[in-house]
């Protein structure tokens, strides 16, 4: 989970980039990333994974981007983002 503050106008954004590595012993994994956003009126959240299928020893990059989609008139706004990474073994 991370908090986003300091974005002030439409188009401002913040990104969190994660390196994901499959450290299993010979088992491939399929990974997925889901996010939640506590303030969807002002912020759009997108998630991307460079490669969602990893063999043992491989790594990939997952990114969460939070973009301001509505400029606040007289207040400061923030949002809390929760990103959940799930890995399932490949058959």
Image: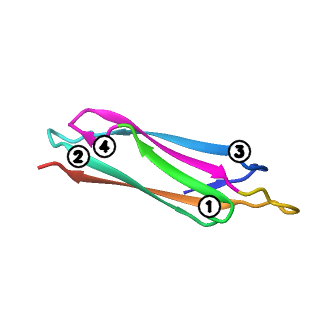
Q: Residue at x 77, y 49 (%)?
A: 9
Residue wearing tag 3: 12
Which disc, if any, is residue 80? 1
> How far is the residue under mark 3 from the one under mark 4?
28 Å
Mark 2: give few (<14), some (14-19) or many (20+) Cα within 10 Å.
Answer: many
Q: Is residue 14 left or right of residue 27?
A: right
Q: Secondary structure at mark 1?
A: strand
Residue 26 lies, with reference to residue 69, above or below; the image says: above
Examine the structure image and report whether residue 57 is included in the region drawn in magenta: yes
Q: Nearer the viewer, mark 4 or mark 2?
A: 4
Residue 13 vs residue 26, the one in the foreground: 13
Residue wearing tag 4: 52
Q: Residue furthest top?
A: 58
Q: Are marks 4 and 2 in contact (CB under 8 Å)?
A: no
Mark 3: give few (<14), some (14-19) or many (20+) Cα within 10 Å.
Answer: some
Q: Quadrant of residue 40?
A: bottom right
> How far is the residue under mark 2 from the one under mark 3?
34 Å
Expressed as whole percent of the image width and height from the top left, the position of residue 24 reads 21, 42
Q: Secondary structure at mark 2?
A: strand
Q: Are marks 1 and 2 in contact (CB under 8 Å)?
A: no
Expressed as whole percent of the image width and height from the top left, the position of residue 44 reads 60, 56
| Magenta span main SS | strand
Numbered range of the magenta stretch: 51-69
Residue wearing tag 2: 29
> How far is the residue under mark 3 from the one under mark 1?
16 Å
Q: Secondary structure at mark 4?
A: loop
């Amino acid at each position: 989970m991370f908090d986003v503050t300091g974005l002030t106008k439409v188009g401002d954004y913040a990104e969190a980039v994660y390196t994901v590595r499959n450290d299993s012993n010979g088992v491939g994994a399929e990974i997925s990333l889901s996010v939640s956003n506590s303030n969807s009126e002002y912020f759009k959240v997108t998630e991307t994974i460079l490669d969602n299928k990893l063999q043992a020893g491989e790594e990939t990059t997952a990114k969460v981007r939070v973009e301001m989609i509505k400029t606040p008139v007289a207040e400061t706004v923030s949002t809390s983002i929760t990103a959940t990474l799930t890995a399932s073994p490949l058959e």
